Amino acid sequence: MEVLAGFKAKTLTPSDYLDACLDQISLINPRINALTTINSSRAVTAAREATKRWQAGSPIGPLDGVPIGVKDLQNTRDLLTTHGSPRLRAYLPDDDLPLVARLRRAGAIVLAKTNVPECGAGGNTRNPVWGATGNPFDANLVCGGSSGGSAAALAANLLPLCTGSDTGGSLRLPAAFCGVVGFRPSVDVVAHPTRPLGWSGISVLGPMTRTVDDLILAMQLCQAADPDDPLSVPAKADRFTALPDIELGDLRVGVSEDFGGAPVDPAIRDTFRNRIETISRKVRNIFPVDLDLGDMDRCFDVLRAESFTAAFGEIIKSEPDAFGDEVSENIKLGQSMSLADRAWAHAEQTRILRRFNALMRDVDVILLPTTPVSPFPWTQRHPAEIDGQKLDIYYRWLSLTYRGSLPGGPSITLPCGRDPFGLPFGLQVLGPVGGDAKVLAVAKALEAAFEQDRETARARPDLNAIPLSKVSLQSIVTHPPQMDAKTGAEKSTLGTAV
């Protein structure tokens, strides 16, 4: 991270860097609505103390003085955490989520929360508390979700590091739409002690950054086990500091345009084929693979619905109108299912894992598009059809990412130029279960190669000329946040499904 090099060399101080971030936020955030709660006064004090430590050569950790954004589904001590839900628009947690606490101990300054869909449901970051987040390339367009505020804040240079979570693509999808890096780690890597179903690994936590090097640094700090997450496993401290050396010319690369038949817009297919043609000249072998691993859509439907039912099912019994359409649809789906459906889904997920493992014996990584469409207007909740195929539920357009969640292994999206509409194109990289270090090493090698070619280099928005949203991003707010909330005055009555 360049800013840390500046701190170490004493050519930049945390106070000066925070001032630059706050200036950028005041200029850009009103145009895209990526950040929600911001505590600048506390951050200024923290940056002043970090500046003294760097000047004395005694930083408290590797991120000392670095301002970060935290996804608004994740508790932050004394900083409003709303989940984008009217039920929590005055909630000030007493404690940090363990992931946030680890970043604080590394010296990070929690400056702001990043916007989300209500309760994290859906790939469009919009809710009735804060409104919608616009894409930094064009604020009329969707930025993705559910970690959409994080991705937009990074792309707009508001902050250098943000947190996120991923069930069906919530770290990868918005990163692809905004031209940054989003990594879904294997289920055991970053402890997630707030999952409603501790033994179901469909949801994971992780960081989001602009570059792979920054992501690797963040993963060094985010990885941890926690007794409240039975799937998390202690690992060697140097897991992400001693990555394997990767030569692209040694790689065996599998390719799938559609993850076993998911609908993909023809323009995205063409862009993907173009990128694969470029990559084929750099690797040892590249060939199509069959990712039809089973009934992945129905399997994900059940696993997702059971998480939402576990998290919110009791609330909706007494308050049928407690949530918006996306959350309610997941709960209703779960309530329509039986124990036999649940047993089938967990057995099918096991079969999918084993078929995936067999496939990965012949390749090092698999490349796919991250999204099946280019960013669309944020006023459209979700695509109704793709390439002439009608979609049966609001999140079906996320199948390129949620199908990759089912085996439980790592996947990353890398910025890889622009699509035919001039918007960021994301290339998704799948790796073997537990192969997080290898995937990050491959991603670093690919990123270096992409940056050498104008066609594949990371797209950057023109922040001086972001098209403003023709519909106000706050127009959908019906329950604005209560900014005068007091810590402990309102206890959370919501968990999280993702």
Image (cartoon, helix red, strand yellow):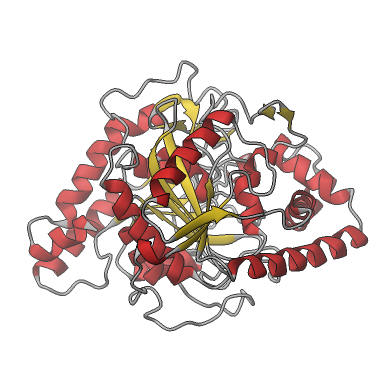
Quarter of the C terminus within the rendering: bottom right
Residue 197 in sight from this viewpoint: no
Residue 356 in sight from this viewpoint: yes
| Residue 124 x/y as whole percent | 57, 36
| Residue 10 x/y as whole percent | 8, 61
Side of 203 relative to 38 (left or right): right
Side of 173 relative to 353 (left or right): left
Residue at figure coordinates x 33%, y 75% from the top left: 241
Work out whether 229 lies above or below 479.
Answer: below
- In this view, the residue in front, 6 or 460, is 460
| Residue 344 x/y as whole percent | 86, 62
- In this view, the residue in front, 403 or 141, is 403
Asked where in the image residue 129 lies, by quadrant, the reply is top right
Residue at figure coordinates x 39%, y 81% from the top left: 237
Residue at figure coordinates x 47%, y 66% from the top left: 99
Work out whether 420 lies above or below 282.
Answer: above
Residue at figure coordinates x 49%, y 43% from the top left: 174
Quarter of the N terminus within the rendering: bottom left
Residue farthest to the top, as pictured: 470
Side of 445 relative to 167 (left or right): left
Q: How many marks?
A: 0
| Residue 336 x/y as whole percent | 89, 48
- In this view, the residue in front, 197 or 291, is 291
